[in-house]
Image (cartoon, rainbow, N blue to C red):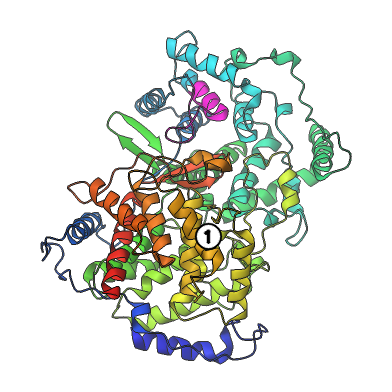
Amino acid sequence: MRNFFVNLFERLETGIHKFNGNGNGNGKHPVPEVPRHQLILENTTIRTNIHTDIPTTKNPLDTAIHKAQQYILNKQKEDGHWVGILEADTTLTSDYIMLMHFIDKVDPEKQEKAAKLLRERQHFDGGWNIYHGGPSEISASVKAYFSLKLAGYAADEPFMRKARKCILDMGGIMKANCFTKIYLAMFGQVDWQAVPAVPVEMLLFPPGFYFSIYELSYWSRCIVVPLSIVIAKKAHIPVGDDLLNELYLTPRDKVVYRIKRNQSGWCWHNFFIDADSIFRRYEQQPIKFVRQIALKKAEKWMLDHVEKSGGVGAIWPGIINSIFAMKCLNYPDNHPALISQLNELEKLIVYEEDKLYLQPCVSPVWDTAWAVVALHESGIPSNHPALQEAGQWLLSKEIKSFGDWALKCKVEEPSGWYFQYENEFYPDTDDSAVVLMALQCISLPENAYKEKAFLRGLKWIQAMQCDDGGWGAFDRNNNKVILNHIPFADFNALLDPSTSDVTGRCLEFLGKIGFSNTYTDIRSAMEFLQREQEEGGSWFGRWGANYIYGTWSVLAGLLAVGEDMNKPYIKKAANWLKSIQNSDGGWGETIQSYDDPFLKGIGKSTPSQTAWALLGLCHASEVKSDAVRKGIEFLLKKQREDGSWDELEFTATGFPKVFYLKYHMYRNYFPLLALSRYRNLMQKSD
């Protein structure tokens, strides 16, 4: 392992990286000596034959770590990877019922299982929420109500009456979000006038143009491009246009569809409302030859992105919207692209006894990388077969071709890792950083190939740094905030700007291989993080819930690059973490903190969020504090006999305020990582 990093730094000194003293990308900077303990945290208290060994001590901490190891190792797939269920809200299950009716291929058994799931997940007030324990949400409730009607349930059923009252109390069908209205318009339940303009002609804007689709986030492109085809074709599925009339507060024929302008005069909000009005009028009589050119370009873009991917973008909305688009383009049922999308969709189904629900995508690369990091931290040696198999699997997932990201990120060779089993167009910096940290933990026979992949990945992450010093997830400099005023952007995540949590992760990886705050671009990232720190000391978590996640990620990165962890802003973050500890010793934070910052750090204790807080405090030199001791005791007390932890809460984020996630493996590998990091640091301090 030591030779690997010596060779790596010899290559770096040839000038391939830009992290140098003057930041001009040409100079050299002495490569710091990297102590072995920074690369591999050795621990010999667990024997290597962990599949059958019992702990050699009765110490409760050692016992808990061993049990957690066993549990995770037993979940490893035959080819070496791990993947847990990625759970979302009921909107996907509702979409699935709608899709079956859209393509006129209703499987009665699957429809009944999906409907049963919807009925079981109905909130006590009659609606449906978007995360465990959350309040009813209008779009999720409207979708569920409509899907249950499609599934054959009558409006006078008691649970349907209850749902209807809840929806009307929340403002009725017209309060649903833009994408819900598009789906309902396809079935004739709302007028197309209710849908903001999503002109397919936007595909004609070249890359680099201010309003090009490449100025939107990766997921937005995958959602919007196929939807623009659907809207251009004005799909209409005859299921009866009056199925949801009872959900209108104002009678449907009297609804005013004009979007309200801001009364303060000229502003970007009003500019885009005016543009939307122009495009809506254009939609009534588009220029035919321009429309045909745009449709062909959108279709080609969609089909190109089906290749080498688990569906368009390898995410649920990209997949289902592309199916809608293909049917609008009159693709026959045996068309290979349509069949491939339907197959990818079926892979996302989770069967749960007599019910089913849908995952938004799958997370094998992310889960595998974190499982490796946690297992190695817990004492599993780098040459253990389980880690070696995982390492080979991770190496096989490095991308080999240029994707959309390459328009703003110039590297000689493509690299990076994606989140799913296949998503060649869209690697992301967060996954890539964790994969590269995981590869540090693994000794592989084919070390030369690993070294080349590691080097390519390093160069790619460096090149993806944004001009503001931070890192976004999938794109570089994807931060034109005025685009958030576009009317169809009400899902609150049109862009992919730099975020604190991803920046912290990238710094953690770079720091682990020897980059420090003496490098110009490292300092730029640190300055970005200091600007992003909240008044109370925390950091916002874009991809995890929420300020606990963000604060852990940042502290991990700052420690790795050599920041003085006794600085006031670091201590402020540590004190914030200690101040929000619950009386049971754990930490928790409700998803509602995305809506109301006053709720930051407040919520029922969960294993994953407790682990993040503990890791953050350990990074901030608080390993011997009472807060950490109590947090460790919480995890030990809550561990199940089989080595796992229970966690019902959603602790991850798709789109803040709109779409949340529950990774079923978070509750296991993050507690293992926290317990192991604590044990290792305590042993070093003795």
Disc 1 target residue = 572
Residue 214 % position (x, y): 68, 57
Which quadrant of the rendered structure holds the N terminus? bottom left
Quick check: 231 left or right of 500?
right
Residue 289 % position (x, y): 80, 45
Q: Residue at coordinates 89% horizontally, 39% vertically from top-left?
A: 265
| Numbered range of the magenta stretch | 127-147
Quick check: 304 left or right of 39?
right
Q: Label 1 crowding class (10 Å Cα cut-off): few <14, some 14-19, many 20+?
A: some
Q: Residue at coordinates 73% horizontally, 61% vertically from top-left?
A: 207
Vertically, is 2 above or below 103? below
Task: Residue 589: say if magenta.
Answer: no
Which quadrant of the rendered structure holds the C terminus? bottom left
* Residue sitting nearer the eye, 516 or 75: 516
* Residue sitting nearer the eye, 125 or 218: 125
Tell me which amino acid carries mark 1: Lys
